[in-house]
Amino acid sequence: MLGINEKLKSLENQGKTINIAIAGIGQMGSGIISHLEKMKSFKILALGDKNLSNSVKKLTGLGYQESDIYSVEKNNHDDLINSKIKISADILRSETINDPNIHKSEINKAVNAGKTILTNDLAVLSHVEDVDVIVDATGNPEAGAQIAIHGLLNRKHIITLNVETDTAIGPLLKKIADNRKVVYSVAAGDEPAALKELYDFANALNLEVIAAGKGKNNPLNRQANPATLKEYAEAKGASIKMMTSFVDGTKSMVEMACFSNSTGIIPDCRGMHAPEADLKDLTTVFCLKKDGGILDKKGIVDFVIGNVAPGVFLVYTTEQEALKKELKYLLYGNGPNYLLYRPFHLASIEAPLSIARAYFYNEPTIASKNGLVSEVVTAAKKDLKPGEIIDGIGGYSVYGLIETYHNAKQENLLPIGLCEGAAVKKEIKKGEIIKYDDVDINEDSIIYKLRKLQEILIN
């Protein structure tokens, strides 16, 4: 079987392309656009972002000519989020959907004339006839739900960098994709996919996994918010909300929950241990307490603050004396624990690998297996008062903590992916875990409806 690099070269030699639509033209989306434009086996047909005028400026900065952009605008942005798709079990069997407000013939005529579609209506991306793969680079849970459900129902592969959506409704999206014989996958390049490579390697060789995780490349501050991180985010050229989710730990929680849901590896405790540790310490820190480590059990997911970033790690062991001797001979130490380490993840730069894998092999890079095993629950970043509206991931109100799905469901805890826009019903103290009963959720949102359907059909 030809590798992805050989498949792409063959496609290029035939004068063919994998046709792409991208949602989100922020830091991640802009990077993907710039990268794909230089790869001859890919062609970007459509782009989506809530801010059209700002997107045109970004695209001209990336080398696009304004005359080559065909804008499709929907003025009431709220209508974009509150899709009219009927969310029920029938969605698994429904035919390709049509939206009478989307003028498909005009859109596809523009594409055939060599124009690039630019729209603030994310549903439009799934109606561009020649698009093979839709890439979600929004980072917004509700937008991610809309992009995925429209795309899958219109038989487009979905490659997402939006782990925030995945950790809430990934199992259902995977099931819908399987039923429609397309791919739903989290993209290569971020830590979950990089870590899954190490896990698959160890698992295939029948090595016992002790712990798997990532390095965190910035300090952990649960109370970080867009005001305290404004200068830091601007210096990094990053979205303030995204940077806040990195520093307050939410991003590490959703990334490791994504990995957990694809493998069955669970956190050892709520929020994970997050020790300060360097690469040389990992095999001794991540072992059982009785052996001098921090763990109550084996087979867990975690993250560390130290010189591990931007890499991922897996601590493993074996009972086979012959393997121990060989590992010692190969200079991997005396055991009983050993380390696998991938020193890099290239973020959105690696996304084309997942696009190509879906297109050529109809396979995901990483996706939930049989429902959620880990949840990311919502904790109050400050004291919250009745009537206050939660501003979501990367804001002033809340941060996320990983927990087992079993415990989260038993305690009726609010998933972080559903929190944005929820109205607080009672006083909630700083650091308190928020329950469903503590808030009024927007039950018209797509992600809420899909989550409820997932709980009926899968979890």
Image: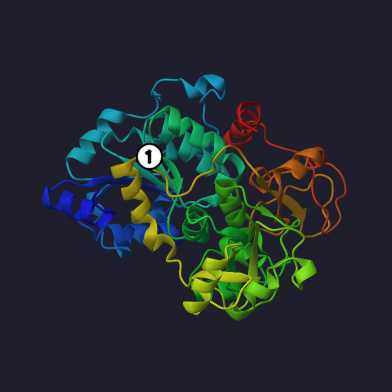
How many callouts does the rendering have? Answer: 1
Asked whether, in this view, residue 455 is left or right of residue 308, the answer is right
Name the residue beneath numbered marker 1. Answer: 157
Question: Residue 333 location in percent, x, y?
Answer: 56, 78
Give the residue at the far front of this rendering: 322
Pointer 1: residues within 10 angstroms few (<14), some, or many (20+)?
many
Up/down of 114 relative to 65, above or below: above
The local secondary structure at tag 1 comes to strand
**In the rendered structure, which amino acid carries the disc numbered 1?**
His
Task: Check the image and tell me how it is coloured.
Answer: rainbow
Between 372 and 332, the one nearer to me in the picture? 332
Between 22 and 179, the one nearer to me in the picture? 179
Asked whether, in this view, residue 216 is left or right of residue 76, the answer is right
Between 10 and 281, the one nearer to me in the picture? 281
Which of the 4 image quadrants contains residue 387?
A: top right
Question: Residue 448 location in percent, x, y?
Answer: 63, 35
Question: Residue 403 location in percent, x, y?
Answer: 72, 51
Up/down of 380 relative to 184, above or below: below
Between 20 and 255, the one nearer to me in the picture? 255
Which of the 4 image quadrants contains residue 299?
A: bottom right
Question: Residue 36 location in percent, x, y?
Answer: 29, 57
**From this viewpoint, is residue 226 visible?**
no
**From this viewpoint, is residue 59 visible?**
yes
Residue at 56 percent of width and 25 percent of height: 87
Q: Which quadrant is the C terminus positioned in? A: top right
Residue at 50 percent of width and 23 percent of height: 91
Which of the 4 image quadrants contains residue 56?
A: bottom left
Give the residue at the far left of this rendering: 14
Asked whether, in this view, residue 427 is left or right of residue 52, the answer is right
